[in-house]
Amino acid sequence: MNNSRLKVGELDVHRLGFGAMRLTGYRPAADRSAAIRVARRAVELGVDFIDTADAYGIGANEELLAEALHPYGHVLIATKVGHTRPSPGEWTPCGRPEYLRQAADLCLRRLRVERIDLLQLHRIDPAVPFPDQLGALDRLVAEGKVRHIGLSEVTVEQVREARRSVDVVSVQNRYNLTDRRHEDVLDYCTAEGIAFIPWDPIAHGEHAGSQFLGTIGTELGATAAQLSLAWLLHRSPVVVPIPGTSSVRHLEENVAAAELELTPEQLARLAAVHPVG
């Protein structure tokens, strides 16, 4: 499809990435060799933007990617810090500057790199002044440990506030056909040329049974997941979906979505699955 690549900072990537979280879930991979095959197959298929986080498997996800793909060559590995998982089902933001620095150093070690191409603040910690959290990330950039800074689950005003003190090249919010609460954030990123990385881009398949997707899927010979991803790619030239899977077959299906061309009428019907507001 047109506009198939995007600049993230000065880094050029394909607009269909891969979310690595499901390779380990929130714990070490049950079948490590199978997970490594998926990661390597993604790169073979042309994926060059892979998203992970220190919280996925308590670092195991980053270690797995390093085992599978290091040295990464042209592949951009984006990771996140600032969100901890003290117990199953519990997530707690932690934005203390000393913690963010320590977490970033551990990411460097696990990923086996001297500089992280894209480090994203996983969540803003309401208990710590936002400028202090941004300052910790900015110092990592100044020290050469981080190339670019991104944010996750933020509002337009929070992005604006952050940009007054640091260069923000990406925003990673939940966004898909059935969850469009961050429509204004996407519009802002589009206007400003900031990469928008929708996590959970196919909503865990929740809208797979929609009659809209079923009808259009029959017309194009595509799955519901492929249609969901294609709609995102058509939605804005700054969108970089990161579908995740632990299956090579599903990975290949997802990557093929980049080749789907949708007509304006089909795009409108897909958008009607869950209208904004």
Image: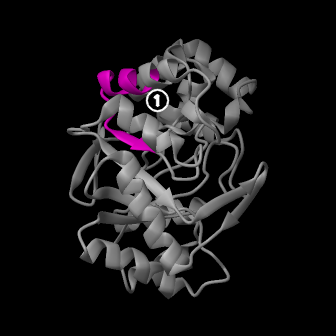
Residue at 24%, 37% in the rendered image: 71
Nearest the camera: 32 or 163?
A: 32
Q: Is residue 236 left or right of residue 89?
A: left
- Residue 138 against residue 35 in the figure, above or below: below
Residue at 78%, 48% in the rendered image: 88
Whether residue 48 appears in magenta in the rendering, the answer is yes
**Label 1 element class:** loop
Which quadrant of the structure image shows residue 138? bottom left
Task: Residue type at mark 1: give it.
Answer: Leu
Whether residue 7 appears in magenta in the rendering, the answer is no
Give x and y (percent) for residue 259.
Answer: 38, 24
Give x and y (percent) for residue 101.
Answer: 43, 71
Which quadrant of the structure image shows residue 277? bottom right
Give x and y (percent) for residue 171.
Answer: 47, 61
- Residue under label 1: 262
Could you tell me if residue 234 is visible in this image?
no
- Residue 209 against residue 123 in the figure, above or below: above
Give x and y (percent) for residue 141.
Answer: 29, 72
Report the colour scheme. Answer: one colour
Q: Residues within 10 Å of mark 1 (few under 14, many from 20)?
A: some
Which quadrant of the structure image shows residue 106? bottom left
Residue at 48%, 46% in the rendered image: 52
Nearest the camera: 12 or 141?
A: 141
Could you tell me if residue 92 is visible in this image?
yes
Quadrant (top left/top right/bottom left/bottom right) for the N terminus: top left
Q: Residues in magenta? A: 38-51
